Amino acid sequence: MEHQWNSKEQLLELLISLVERASITGSQEEVALSEYIYYLLKGKKYFQQNREYLGLHPVHDGRSFVTALVKQGDYKETIVLLSHFDVVDVNDYGDLKKLAFQPIQLTNELKNRKSQLSKEVLKDLESDEWLFGRGTMDMKAGLSVQLSMLEKAISGEFQGNILLVTVPDEEVNSAGMLSAVAILEDIRKKYDLTYKACINSEPMFAKYPNDENQYIYSGSIGKMLASFYCSGIETHVGEPFSGLNATILISEINRIMELNDSFCEQIGNEVTPPPTGLMMRDLKQEYSVQIPHTSVSMYNILMFNQSINDIHEKLLSVAKIAAIKVEEFYKERATNYQQFVAFTPLDLKVNVFTYEELLEKAVAKSGESEVHRRLNYLAANRGAQGDRDFSTRMVSELAGLCKEYSPMIVLFYSPPFYPAVSSSNDRLIQKTIQKVISYTQDQFGITLNHQHYFPGLSDLSFVQLNESKESIAQLTTSMPLYGNHFHLPFQEMKSLNIPVLNIGPVGRDPHKWTERLHIPYAFDTLPSILEYAIKSLLR
């Protein structure tokens, strides 16, 4: 057959066609790109003759993902090639925003703006080996190379089957992959397949600034989105000691949480980054002279092997320490102010609850039917409110039913949640990694460094499950959206249990306006490495 996606030039053309479709997560273009990929594959003679092997599957919110299976005879052994086609927004591009999805034009325009670029970016630009633009690195180059592998499978170049899965929404909630898990299981059963490995082709992530090393990964880091809702006591600004400002509570939590290395975890030379805040704000809707008496903050918690229970206990400890510190702070400031005014300050006791405990208190006070009525009303009138804000709204509703417990700090969790996965102890994966490292060194003079966890988060998290359902329940019972708007397909993840690998291109500055892809590695080197890895896994 004639290859459309074989040469460097053909792959570059394919990449540009994918990048030009501005598939920002949640946009109409994201919906359109899944259809574009589907129709690209639908044009292949193989899928015209085997229509049942190509699918465009719906996600619950109107988006869709693509699966494409290429079977070789009676082989059961199958490699899953996983990718995502959504990208983050382009607001960081400033006045270059209109060129963010025009990689050739953007790269050329940057040559007229050299004074705006760092030395590292300028060096890459002047080498003429790098292509700039949103999605070039993350991760439409990886998808392009995977499509070329699918084409090779159609030509019969692998002694086994290839199943391509490409999904939306990886950059936000992984709704695409969470929907794809069940389809993966259905395809496995329908065609009696054995999934030997799932290969993602996310780009390599630098471990530190100007990191020139190149990596191959046998796992993917996990993530929890820890959230703290704070309810103070409302008062007029003229009587500040008659209440408690919720910003004091959230500020103390932030002081303890931000870059707290007690949450870090080390395996060999790999270390999880410490927590950092992703949201911190009071919940006043407009200006007034009433103090802010509610606030919320959310933190990125990354993990390798730490159990959910251990992290949960650390987070509760943070809340309890913050509560004590704020009580001491209030007493100190009240004592100082008493030198000016004789008054009796509040006897403050800051309560600490999990969402599960708050829900129990609300039900005990108002009844289960009333609590459900209120939460259902919120859901019916949610509108376009995102998962994080709506989670906060649900907690706020319950806290409003339990005002007698204020001031309080409520620990809860918001989507997304990514379980940590690793195949570092899988014999086939480790054997394949050593082969790929040797092959890459021999063929290209490039040293690939093995890392146990891909650090940038990925949908590999959902093709196996190492945590027990009981352990994850520690998280889900304090996740307001769990069960209605968000769920994990535990059974399918456990059943799939696919060993994982990440073999991807070289890029720099993901999620920045200087995002760029190294073209020679992506389209000269990576296709050979990925093809070799697939053949090694199928032997």
Image (cartoon, helix red, strand yellow):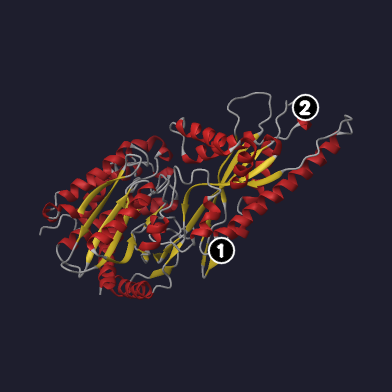
Viewer-proximal residue among 219 and 442: 219
Q: Is residue 489 visible?
A: yes
Quarter of the image with the C terminus is bottom left
Q: Does the image show residue 128? A: no
According to the picture, the residue beneath numbered tag 2 turns out to be 239
x, y percent for residue 120: 43, 54
| Vertical arrangement, residue 170 with respect to residue 213, above or below | above
Instruction: Look at the numbered disc 2 and give the secondary structure of its residue.
Output: loop
Closer to the camera in the image, 307 or 129: 307
Within 10 Å of the Cα at label 1, are there few (<14), some (14-19), or many (20+) other Cα atoms?
A: some
Which amino acid, by three-letter code, is at mark 2?
Glu
Q: Is residue 500 left or right of residue 289?
A: left
Q: Which residue is mark 1?
A: 265
User: Given the image, on which type of amino acid does mark 1 rest?
Assistant: Glu
How far across and down, in percent of the image, does residue 17 sit? 24, 45
Q: Secondary structure at mark 1?
A: loop
Q: In the image, what residue occupies the spot 42% across and 46% down? A: 173
Instruction: Give the distance between the C-alpha atoms of the residues marked 1 and 2, in whole angstroms.
Output: 45 Å
Residue at x-position 35% and y-position 43%: 110
How many residues crowd mark 2 within 10 Å: few (<14), some (14–19), many (20+)?
few
* First along the sequence among labels 1 and 2: 2
Compare residues 287 and 133 and report the one nearer the observer. Answer: 287
Q: Quadrant of residue 149?
A: bottom left
Q: Nearer the viewer, residue 393 or 494?
A: 494
- Name the outermost residue toward the top: 288
Look at the picture and state if 357 lies above or below 472: above
